[in-house]
């Protein structure tokens, strides 16, 4: 029996079959398109728990906001979600091209535009990040041009990055319980 080829921690034949089935099978495409869901439940103070599929993520704010700093904040987790999605895209694109990755790290950074709006001291402005810096550090078996192409493919194909980078309609509802 032939040994299955693995590259960058992925089974090459398996990931190729999955990607091809997304293109060829409408049911598979529908399954990976969504809906994706998260439920966030307040835990007191500025603490919250997010429930996603079978996973739980805790959130909190820094001690400077009278919080316990028991977990990363939502805005830090947003940066991490962008970085994680870019990482997945980079590894996927490298693996599809047969490129071995030895080290990969993505550093993200953002500064709030007008946090005074969040604090209730300013009626206007953007309390969020007006921009996010993402820097890729990679050591892999390819030349710099190819590695840059992989980085661009990861950026262009990242669902999280593209959701944040483009206007995204947030449909809200409210219910008193």
Image (tube, grey):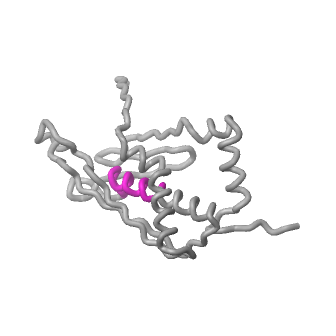
Q: Residue furthest front?
A: 145
- Work out whether residue 98 or residue 134 is closer to the camera in this orientation and state it: 98
Q: Is residue 27 magenta?
A: no
Q: Is residue 77 magenta?
A: yes
Residue beneath the point at 37% across and 55% down = 79
Q: Is residue 6 above or below residue 68?
A: below
Q: Residue furthest left?
A: 121
Residue beneath the point at 68% across and 56% down = 15
Q: Residue furthest right?
A: 1
User: From which residue to which does the magenta span run?
Assistant: 71-85
- Work out whether residue 52 or residue 65 is closer to the camera in this orientation and state it: 52
Quarter occupied by residue 83: bottom left
In-image side of 117 versus 19 (left or right):
left
In-image side of 176 versus 89 (left or right):
left
Residue beneath the point at 60% across and 42% down = 32
Q: Position of residue 57 (x, y in %)?
A: 45, 51
Residue beneath the point at 47% across and 62% down = 151
In-image side of 127 versus 97 (left or right):
left
Quadrant position of the N terminus in the picture: bottom right
Quadrant position of the C terminus in the picture: top left
Q: Position of residue 81 (x, y in %)?
A: 43, 53
In-image side of 88 versus 110 (left or right):
right
Q: Is residue 176 above or below residue 34?
A: above
> How many marks are shown on the rendered structure?
0
Quarter occupied by residue 61: bottom left
Q: What is the magenta segment's predominant secondary structure?
A: helix
């Amino acid at each position: 029996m032939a040994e299955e080829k693995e590259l960058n921690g992925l089974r090459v034949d398996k990931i190729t079959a999955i990607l091809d089935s997304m293109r060829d099978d409408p049911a598979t495409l529908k399954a990976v398109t969504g809906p994706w869901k998260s439920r966030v439940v307040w835990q007191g103070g500025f603490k919250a728990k997010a429930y996603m599929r079978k996973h739980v993520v805790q959130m909190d704010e820094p001690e400077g906001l009278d919080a316990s700093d028991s977990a990363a904040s939502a805005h830090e987790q947003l940066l991490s979600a962008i970085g994680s999605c870019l990482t997945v895209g980079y590894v996927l694109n490298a693996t599809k091209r047969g490129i071995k990755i030895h080290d990969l790290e993505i550093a993200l950074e953002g500064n709030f535009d007008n946090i005074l709006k969040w604090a209730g001291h300013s009626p206007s402005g953007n309390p969020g990040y007006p921009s996010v810096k993402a820097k890729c550090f990679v050591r892999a078996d390819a030349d710099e041009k190819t590695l840059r192409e992989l980085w661009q493919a990861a950026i262009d194909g990242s669902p999280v990055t593209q959701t944040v980078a483009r206007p995204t309609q947030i449909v809200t509802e409210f219910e008193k319980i």
